[in-house]
Image: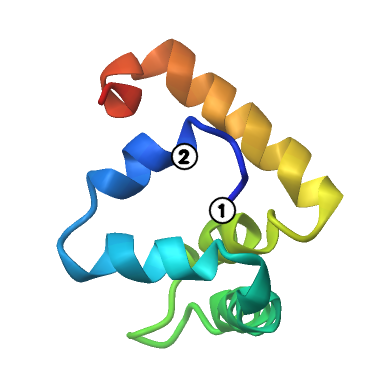
Amino acid sequence: MLNDPRVQPLIDKLPAPLPRWLRWMRKPQAKWVRIATGISLIIGSCLSILPIFGIWMLPLGMIVLAQDIPLFQRLCSRLLDWIERRHPAWLAK
């Protein structure tokens, strides 16, 4: 969710309905939706013993909150650096 240009190629590779929804979520007017979604995902990761919930929700919640919280921005930037080094094809357009 960062305003990093490396995020757009990753979003473009997602299945059909997700890229449009994520582009909307990245807009400034969706701030409260992003915060509510991110917090919900992080709380849902605590319920990972249930079938629908899982630990996968924790990093996703952090990525969603990264646009609004500087600590998560640094973590996501490090993640993007790692992806750039290890999997450059993922960021290719």
Residue drawn at the location 65% of the way across and 28% of the way down: 78
Q: Quadrant of residue 63?
A: bottom right
Of the residues shown, which amino acid type is indicated by label 2?
A: Val
Q: Could you give the CA–CA distance between mark 2 and mark 1, rounded to whole angstroms? A: 7 Å
Q: Is residue 31 above or below residue 15?
A: below
Disc sitting over residue 1 in the figure: 1
Residue located farthest toward the right when viewing the structure as drawn: 70
Dividing the image into 4 quarters, which one contains the C terminus? top left
| Residue tagged 2 | 7
Tag 2 and tag 1, C-beta contact below 8 Å: yes
Residue 79 in picture, x, y percent from top left: 58, 32
Q: Quadrant of residue 17?
A: bottom left
Q: Does 16 sit left or right of 76 as displayed? A: left
Disc sitting over residue 38 in the figure: none
Which of the two labelled residues, at mark 2 and mark 1, occupies the earlier sequence position? 1
Q: Does 79 sit left or right of 87 as displayed? A: right
Residue 30 in picture, x, y percent from top left: 61, 77
Q: Is residue 27 above or below residue 66?
A: below
